[in-house]
Image (cartoon, rainbow, N blue to C red):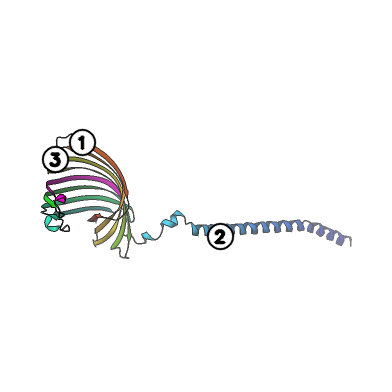
Amino acid sequence: MKNIIISFLFFAALAVPAFPMAEAEDSFRKAADSLTVARDTAAVRDYHIKEKFLPVSKRIDRGINTITYVFKNEIAVGIDVSYGTLSSDDTNLMLLLDDINMKGSVFTVNPSVGYFFRDNMCVGTRFGYSKVDGNLGNVSLDLGTEDLNLSLSDILLRSQVMNMGVFLRSYAGVDPKGVFGLFAELELMYKVGNSMFSYTTSSGPNTTNTNNNQLRLGISAGVAVYIMPKICCNLSFGLGGISFNKITQHDAAGQYTGSRTATSMNWKLNLLDIGIGFNVHL
């Protein structure tokens, strides 16, 4: 009997600290559940915030580069060439201008080299030369009254412009085969040129020489089509930009007559800034 009592007391002594241990385990379990609920609540809150304010990486990744239009490490060598003429036979200005004797021509060439540092992304440099010749022999403005008649003669305009710049271009494929694509381009360009404008009045001939310097940051967009496996044709449209111009004028004797600076910002489709060319991908 004595041994039974001692055994009972021994097991009872062992069972006494089990109650605080069970309470501690229950407290830890409740704390863990609270942390889990708090974590889930924070995850839901972050999800709603991300849905309302997407991170930059998700805003940019819209699947534009799903189709690889140009592959990484390719080199694109391209050129844009244009030539046009204009004569008085091609004009009809509402029958207000009579006796027009006008001839003109515009020639432009722009070679470029680009390197694709990753798929559909290209960085490169571009050079260019443009020449304009215009001759207006005579023109008469007749508005039906003697006081509003005007006659001009011997008007000559000659201009030459050289430019160089760097550009960043991004392509996006349109069809699964990668034949048709769209592109957007950001270009920083510096232009330097001179022009000569002369005309004749009743007091004699007058000539003005102009030197022009321009720094321009512009944006353009366009379409591209592969006509051969390694030859791509491009059609681009100017969308405007920011430019800084400095113009200096001299007379026929080379004497300084004046100068001006101008800064402009224009964002719209420019139908006069249309480029057609092709690239050879190596």
Residue at the spot 20% in from the left edge and 40% down from the top edge: 210
Q: As drawn, is 33 to the left or to the right of 76?
A: right
Residue holding disc 2? 44
- List x then y, in percent, for residue 166: 29, 47
Q: Earlier in the sequence, mark 2 or mark 1?
A: 2
Q: CA distance from mark 1 to mark 3?
A: 13 Å
Q: Amino acid at mark 1?
A: Thr
- Residue type of the residue flagged with mark 3: Asn
24 left or right of 91?
A: right
**Residue linked to disc 3:** 206
Question: At 59% across and 59% down in the image, what residue appears?
Answer: 41
Magenta segment boundaries in residue numbering = 146-167
In the picture shown, does residue 155 fall above or below 281?
Answer: above
What's the residue at 27%, 51% (across, down)? 114
The answer to whether residue 100 is above or below residue 253 is below
Residue 234 in view: yes
In the rendered image, which quarter is residue 232 located in? bottom left
